[in-house]
Amino acid sequence: MPWHDKRIRREKKEQQRVIAAGQTDREQMTKAEARQFTFHAILAGMLIALVFSAAWVLFILFCTQVWFR
């Protein structure tokens, strides 16, 4: 169990120290990469909204044409 393992606790503390010191090994995205990432995230959200909207329209059509007749 991880809460009993001192090694895991030590590793987490070391990671927190590294993050607090700003010594992460991650690379910073360029402006073009950040713009592209944002664009694709918005596009994915719009696609999900489109799918839900289409399902809602189909449900309304089903209700008016089949269920309530």
Image (spheres, grey):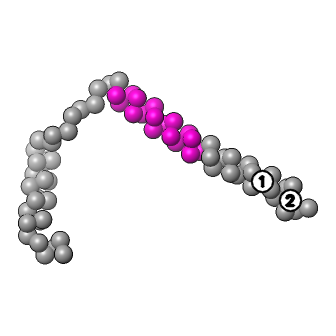
Q: Quadrant of residue 23?
A: top left
Quick one: SS at disc 1?
helix
Question: Which residue lies most toward the right here?
Answer: 69
- The percent position of residue 51, horizontal first and vertical second, equals 62, 46
Kind of residue at disc 1: Ile
Residue on which the image places disc 2 = 66
Kind of residue at disc 2: Val
Q: Nearer the viewer, mark 1 or mark 2?
A: 2
The verdict on residue 13 being magenta is no
Vertical placement of residue 50 versus 56, above or below: above
- The percent position of residue 6, horizontal first and vertical second, equals 8, 70
Q: Quadrant of residue 7?
A: bottom left
- The percent position of residue 59, horizontal first and vertical second, equals 74, 55
- For image coordinates 49% across by 37% down, the residue present is 42
- For image coordinates 59% across by 45% down, the residue present is 49
Vertical placement of residue 32 versus 55, above or below: above
- The C terminus sits in image quarter: bottom right
Distance from label 1 to label 2 (Cα)?
A: 10 Å
Residue on which the image places disc 1 = 60
- For image coordinates 39% across by 33% down, the residue present is 37
Vertical placement of residue 3 versus 56, above or below: below
> Which range of residues does the magenta coloring cover?
33-49
Q: Chief secondary structure of the magenta span?
A: helix
Circles 1 and 2 in contact, beta carbons < 8 Å: no
Crowd around label 2: few <14 · some 14–19 · many ≥20 (10 Å): few
Q: Which mark is residue 18?
A: none
Q: Quadrant of residue 24?
A: top left
The verdict on residue 47 being magenta is yes
Q: Earlier in the sequence, mark 1 or mark 2?
A: 1
Q: Is residue 65 left or right of residue 4?
A: right
